[in-house]
Amino acid sequence: MPERPPFSPVIALLTVSSVWDARLNAALKDLGLTTRKYGLLAHIHATPGISFSELARRSQITVQTAHTAVRTLQEEGLVQDATAQAGAASDLRATDKGEAALTEADARLARLDAAFGEGVPRLSEALQGLHEEPFGA
């Protein structure tokens, strides 16, 4: 029988992340959101007028991917580009529908956060702040 590889905190974190990403996606599905759409909408809400390049940087995606994702959010009525002129800087903002979806998504995320924190409080505490300043960034 082959020997098991040693414990890997990276693999453990990726596994836990995958489980909770699936739970968050399930919680957001009827709002028409995914984890990525929720993150983009939250960035747009937090910084009205954000540029595509800044949105891409914060979301760790390419500018082209940001354009594609925002186009989808626009088609769904969640985001608007107040400028929307070729060659002009974008002025991205959440619509009223986007704000309502974000408010409900935030409430659902808070319930998932509470469940996670109750299940693994030490891990929850250890993770605090890592999304803003990850190791090796």
Image (cartoon, grey):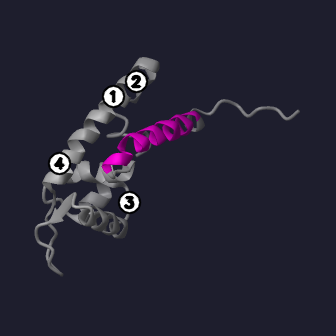
Q: Tag 3, which secondary structure?
A: loop
Q: Nearer the viewer, mark 2 or mark 3?
A: 2
**Amino acid marked by disc 4:** Glu
Residue 80 lies, in percent from the top left, at 17, 64
Q: Residues within 10 Å of mark 1 (few under 14, many from 20)?
A: few
Q: Looking at the image, do the residues carrying marks 2 and 3 touch, with CB atoms under 8 Å apart?
A: no
First in sequence: mark 3 or mark 4?
A: 3
Residue that numbered label 1 is attached to? 111
First in sequence: mark 4 or mark 1?
A: 4
Query: Does 29 appear in magenta?
Result: yes
Q: In this rendering, is residue 87 above or below 31?
A: below
Q: Tag 1, which secondary structure?
A: helix
Q: Is residue 109 left or right of residue 7?
A: left
Residue 81 lies, in percent from the top left, at 16, 67
Q: Which mark is residue 99?
A: 4
- Res. 36 visible in picture: yes
Q: Which residue occupies the extreme bottom position in the image?
A: 86
**Amino acid marked by disc 1:** Arg
Q: Which residue occupies the extreme front position in the image?
A: 30
